[in-house]
Image (cartoon, rainbow, N blue to C red):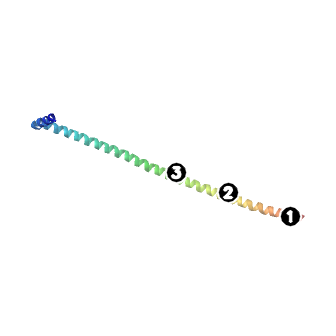
């Protein structure tokens, strides 16, 4: 402990050491600020890229969602038309079956 006290006393009594230590502290502080600024800029670039990707993906998915909904609507219309045709054919077949059954019953 005495050695550290001697070193601090020697630095405190010598103005050149104080100037060198002050310059060293300033350089370290400037280096830390530069690294912090670089980190913030990189973080902003990455965040901007990520937000751009999200916006692009959302637009793409909403377009594909609209396309999928349109496709489903088209299929539903096709099914509706086909279902109407099947229902009409079934009614005709039922009427024909009724007529055939009446004819056979009358023949007997």
Residue at 52% over, 53% down: 65
Tell me which numbered mark, 2 or 1, is placed earlier along the sequence.
Answer: 2
**Tag 3's secondary structure?**
helix
Nearest-to-viewer mark from 2 and 1: 1
Which labelled disc corresponds to residue 89?
Answer: none
Q: Residue furthest left?
A: 13
Residue placed furthest toward the right: 108
Q: Give x and y (percent) for residue 93.
A: 77, 60
Q: Foreground: 107 or 25? A: 25
Residue on which disc 1 sits: 103
Q: Do the residues under discs 3 and 2 have CB atoms within 8 angstroms?
A: no
Q: Position of residue 13 (x, y in %)?
A: 9, 37
Above or below 44: residue 99: below
Mark 2 lies on a secondary structure that is helix
Marks 2 & 1, CB-CB < 8 Å contact: no
Residue 64 got which mark?
3
Image position of 29 (left or right of 81): left
Disc 3 to disc 2, C-alpha distance = 27 Å
Could you classify mark 2 by the number of other residues whose Cα lies within 10 Å: few (under 14), some (14-19), or many (20 or more)?
Answer: few
Which sits earlier in the primary sequence, circle 3 or circle 1? 3
Expressed as whole percent of the image width and height from the top left, the position of residue 46 reads 37, 44
The picture quadrant where one finds residue 85 is bottom right
Residue at the image point whose x is 59% and y is 57% from the top: 73
- Front-most of 20 and 44? 20
| Marks 3 and 2, the one that precedes in the sequence | 3
Residue ID for mark 2? 82
């Amino acid at each position: 402990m005495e050695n550290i006290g001697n070193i601090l006393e020697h630095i405190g009594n010598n103005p050149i050491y104080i100037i060198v230590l002050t310059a060293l502290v300033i350089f370290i502080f400037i280096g830390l600020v530069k690294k912090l600024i670089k980190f913030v800029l990189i973080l902003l670039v990455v965040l901007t890229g990520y937000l751009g990707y999200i916006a692009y993906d959302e637009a793409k998915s909403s377009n594909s969602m609209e396309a999928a909904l349109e496709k489903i609507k088209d299929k539903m219309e096709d099914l509706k038309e086909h279902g109407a045709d099947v229902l009409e054919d079934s009614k005709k077949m039922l009427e024909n079956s009724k007529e055939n059954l009446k004819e056979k019953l009358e023949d007997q």
